[in-house]
Amino acid sequence: MLGKKYTFESKKTRLHRLLISGAMIFVLSFGVIASFLVYIPIYAKLQKGRAAGAFYQKSPDAIAVFTGDKGRISYALDLLKKNPSAKLFISGVHAANSFKTLIEKQAGPITGGEVVNNVGMQVDLDYESKNTFENVRETVQFLKNNAQFSKVLIISSDYHIMRIKLIISHEMTGDKPEIFFDSVTNSYADWSEIKKLLKEAVKISRTFFLMKIMREDVVSEED
């Protein structure tokens, strides 16, 4: 007699099957997340190497640095000293800061007065940005206002570079300069740095989903 074949499953075997399936999904998800976390700083290192090659014998036309985590401003100033012809753009400056006070707070032994005297009027400050998306948007506007720039260097923390590049690819349209990325390298030797990396992995995933799949702007980022 031909007919449908039914397979009956007891509660015990069903629970066993669900546990096995759940464990496999967890292991697979953990592997994907772990690989992603490892790749984020590697990606930043690759971008750093690309920038080093591009500016080995030539200075960038502009250096844009995003405020936020420690070391970014001082790293940008070190590069500016090596490339004095570059114009500096600092995005995300607190309203209470001038260029001088910002440098005094974040650049360690380099005083604001010395830097101001060295770079003169080659500095633009962005007081509007409150998160990464706005940092990118203001930087893009800065580049549009300076269409003569052909090569631009953007600086942030290493965990931040992948998301910045993702948003820039969404925001930059039409004629655009060649953009390179350099970063402050983190050691990820303690939990506070690892936690930043974990949070950033979530933000990158969210940004990719909203921009590339939903085709929406990410305007509600927390930083």
Image (spheres, rainbow, N blue to C red):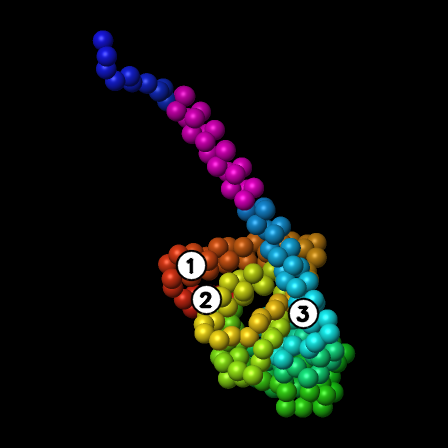
User: Left or right: where does residue 118 sit relative to residue 99?
Assistant: right
- Proximity of marks 1 and 2: CB atoms separated by less than 8 Å: yes
Whether residue 83 is visible: yes
Q: Residues within 10 Å of mark 1 (few under 14, many from 20)?
A: some
Quadrant housing residue 9 = top left
Which mark lies nearer to you, 1 or 3?
Answer: 3
Residue under numbered circle 2? 170
Q: CA distance from mark 1 to mark 3?
A: 29 Å
Q: Contact (CB < 8 A) between labels 2 and 3?
A: no
In front of the other: label 2 or label 3?
A: 3
Residue 74 falls in image quadrant? bottom right
Q: Position of residue 143 (x, y in %)?
A: 53, 79
Amino acid type of the residue tagged 2 in the rendering: His
Q: Check the image and report above or below for 170 versus 9.
A: below
Mark seen at residue 134: none
Query: Which residues fall within the magenta stretch?
Result: 12-32
Q: Nearer the viewer, residue 4 or 146?
A: 146
Mark 3 highlights which residue?
54
Horizontal and vertical percent position of residue 198: 57, 54
Tell me whether the residue at label 1 lies in contact with that at label 3, contact meaning CB atoms closer than 8 angstroms. no
Name the residue carrying label 1: 212
